[in-house]
Image: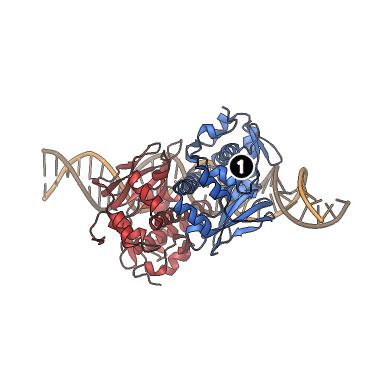
Chain colours: A blue, B red, C brown, D orange
Amino acid sequence: MTRSQDHPLGNLMRQLELYSKLPDEDRRLVLNLPHRLRRLDAGSYLVREGDKPTQCMVLVDGFAFRQKVTGDGSRQILAVCIPGDAVDLQNMFLDVSDHSVQLLTQSHVADVPREALQELVLTQPAIGTAIIQLTLVEASILREWVVNVGRRDARERIAHILCEFAVRLESRGLAGDHGFELPMTQEQLADATGLTSVHVNRVLKGLEADGLISRKRRYIHYSNWRALQDAGDFSRRYLHISEHDTIAQTY
Amino acid sequence: MTRSQDHPLGNLMRQLELYSKLPDEDRRLVLNLPHRLRRLDAGSYLVREGDKPTQCMVLVDGFAFRQKVTGDGSRQILAVCIPGDAVDLQNMFLDVSDHSVQLLTQSHVADVPREALQELVLTQPAIGTAIIQLTLVEASILREWVVNVGRRDARERIAHILCEFAVRLESRGLAGDHGFELPMTQEQLADATGLTSVHVNRVLKGLEADGLISRKRRYIHYSNWRALQDAGDFSRRYLHISEHDTIAQTY
DNA sequence: CGTTTAATTGAAAGCAGTCAAACTATGTGG
DNA sequence: CCACATAGTTTGACTGCTTTCAATTAAACG
């Protein structure tokens, strides 16, 4: 009944419990949230800047990213959403979306009515705490991204974002042993790091040449995790994921 | 009783009501929050990265900034806090601070016990909504900052951040007519925009030479608001401040 | 298989950084 | 009130990391 293995909102549930366990009652309330399940293709927009959304979407599986486009048409990716992420906590309490969300891969998305989730957050303290914590961790990641694009050179930026993916994916059991499938193109990686795709390519080759990573298509393998972290000035503190939450994290 | 004019938490109160009015009962609860008032010098740290804070600090007056330092010692400023800002909503629900907060000017700071504010947020829906909205707007500003350092050139970055200050300060009645006192040095401006102080200086002179701004010490005057916005690719949407909230905003 | 998208590589140009020094304001102590 | 110290601003010359532009190769897909 409270099993979250195959339930569409199971991944969301697991994420909510990352920072503190929920009472059984609350878990039931979350899993019983009304929702509509959809399957959408890569590239689909979940939210567009300027929208007034009425649903809070949850990524059941698949990947997505937040983005904004500048006046001259260049794009900045602001965050990568992984399975279980609630895509618009933002829009649950603000009326107009300030950025767009687009699918990186074909995905299953659950639409939860804004008011239903809002009510849980405001009336169930444990759920409210969990949702606020998720929001704050997302803000923390944003701060680190500002540092990344503002104060690190290209090589550090790429190494850093690879480390971030590694830890986040491992913490959800979505990574392999010392490696993971990068769910984005080099151009998207460029838009996430404030670089050009050409330069991202050169940097990736450089990291590979220096033996920090090896690649097979989009799969990134890091044999020397410590060295990769050093190259990216990476410390996992800002992710607020304790060591124990990470599966098979080795040093 | 519910007057917030001279109360230390008055500015916080006004900010909480930016997005929706609070019931009188809730306003009373906020103003009655236990707190200790301190006066601190410019440069004082309110929070240090790695701290486990027990207080939530509110800037009664004065300015502060969030920052992180990279491994090689360079600094990135992540946000500028203005009077009324709750400085560590982050730390209210997360146990370890992921960044530091430092005062820009001599300021009065109110320390509110973490638990007292937490309880209000979790038990009073209107207060919870208001606090969550503030958190989300801060995240929205962070997203815009990622765009700023990631995808705009130096001139656009500086023009953009000047526009942001203008709107935020005007919305609190802290700006003059088409101008405001910039509470930071060019070096700090550089650390906020991912540039060097040398280049910030050149850009400022450039904006001045082009007639977009004029400066008298730290005071920034913009005679052509529209042109400054264009130069900075600025749109106020991400601030989630409605036009009406801004005092004397003219075009 | 042909077509499209993504990855790769090379050469040249440019924006911003680095280094260094001069200048200005502000503040302090004698 | 002046001499000096300190912090911040301004300016110039040079360097270099990244971008831009353009073309080629490789992979994915119907």
Residue in the picture at 53% in, 57% down: A116
The quarter of the picture where residue B131 lies is bottom left
Visible residue check, residue B152: no
Indicate left or right for A150 with A168 as reference: left
Chain at numbered mark 1? A
Where does the N terminus of chain A fall, quadrant-wise?
Answer: top right
Where does the C terminus of chain A fall, quadrant-wise?
Answer: top right
Residue at the extreme top of the image, as rendered: A251
| Secondary structure of the residue carrying numbered label 1 | loop
Relative to A102, is A52 above or below? Answer: below
The quarter of the picture where residue B82 lies is bottom left
Q: Amino acid at mark 1?
A: Arg
Q: How many marks?
A: 1
Visible residue check, residue B231: yes
Q: Position of residue B15 (x, y in %)?
A: 35, 59
Q: Position of residue A31 (x, y in %)?
A: 58, 49
Relative to B160, is A4 above or below? Answer: above
Residue in the picture at 39% in, 43% down: B91
* Residue marked by disc 1: A3
The front one of B226 and A216 is A216
How many other residues sit within 10 Å of disc 1, few (<14), some (14-19) or many (≥20)? few
Q: Position of residue A5 (x, y in %)?
A: 64, 42
The front one of C26 and B235 is B235
Indicate left or right for D28 with B12 as reference: right
Residue in the picture at 47% in, 63% down: B237
The front one of A174 and B209 is A174
Q: Position of residue B148 (x, y in %)?
A: 49, 54
